[in-house]
Amino acid sequence: MKKSIIVALCALLGMTAVRAQQVTLAPVEGVPDAAREVLEQRFTQMVLQNGLDLGEDGALLRITVETTSRMETPGSMSQVAVVLSVGASVEKGGTVVSSQIFSVKGVGADDDDAIVRAVKQILPKSKAAQAFMADVKEKIS
């Protein structure tokens, strides 16, 4: 009896089509590889947690990073502090549908470490991220 139930469940699961959501990201340039990976992860989470499927809609998520300020502390154990403007825009058919700027700060042992720590400040569940995704959802649906 147990075997027949398991076989029936496996057959049912095999027939059920599961559609994976997709996110199409433009290449992120000008940041260390570790920061690029964090950015891609955070923005992919942001999109998928809001039920968007940018790959199927033909939309492209473009992320830009600009260092707005950089400061190095003096001394033998100097650290670097950076302030970044991380821009995110969703484009469809070459037209920007929605965009948002995230201002983040990071402190680290060197530039790369500070940048990675700064981009980790972008949280997919933040109010700014939720507002951005709501605007995208409204405009591409």
Image (cartoon, rainbow, N blue to C red):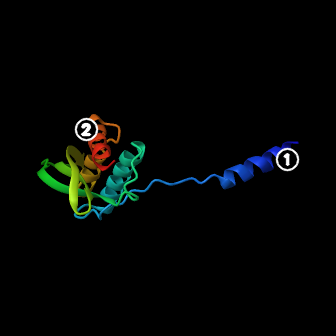
Q: What residue is drawn where x is 23% and y is 46%?
A: 106
The answer to which quarter of the image holds residue 112 is bottom left
Q: Is residue 41 left or right of residue 9?
A: left
Residue type indicated by callout 2? Ala
**Image location (x, y in percent) of residue 109:** 25, 52
Q: Name the mark nearer the viewer: 2 or 1.
A: 1
Q: Quadrant of the N terminus?
A: top right
Q: What residue is drawn where x is 37% and y is 55%?
A: 54
Q: Is residue 132 visible?
A: yes
- The residue labelled by disc 2 is 128
Q: Secondary structure at mark 1?
A: helix
Give the label on residue 3, or none. 1
Give the label on residue 22, or none. none
How crowded is the residue under tag 1: few (<14 C-alpha within 10 Å), some, or many (20+)? few
Q: Is residue 78 visible?
A: no
Q: Nearer the viewer, residue 105 or 58?
A: 58
Determine whether label 2 and label 1 are within 8 Å by CB.
no
**Could you tell me how far apart the alpha carbons at marks 2 and 1 are, in whole angstroms?**
50 Å
Q: Nearer the viewer, residue 120 or 15?
A: 15
User: Along the polypeptide, which appears first: circle 2 or circle 1?
Assistant: 1
**Image location (x, y in percent) of residue 15:** 67, 54
**Image location (x, y in percent) of residue 58:** 34, 61
**Image location (x, y in percent) of residue 92:** 27, 59
Residue type indicated by callout 1? Lys
How crowded is the residue under tag 2: few (<14 C-alpha within 10 Å), some, or many (20+)? some
Q: Nearer the viewer, residue 106 or 90?
A: 90
Q: What residue is drawn where x is 68% and y is 50%?
A: 13
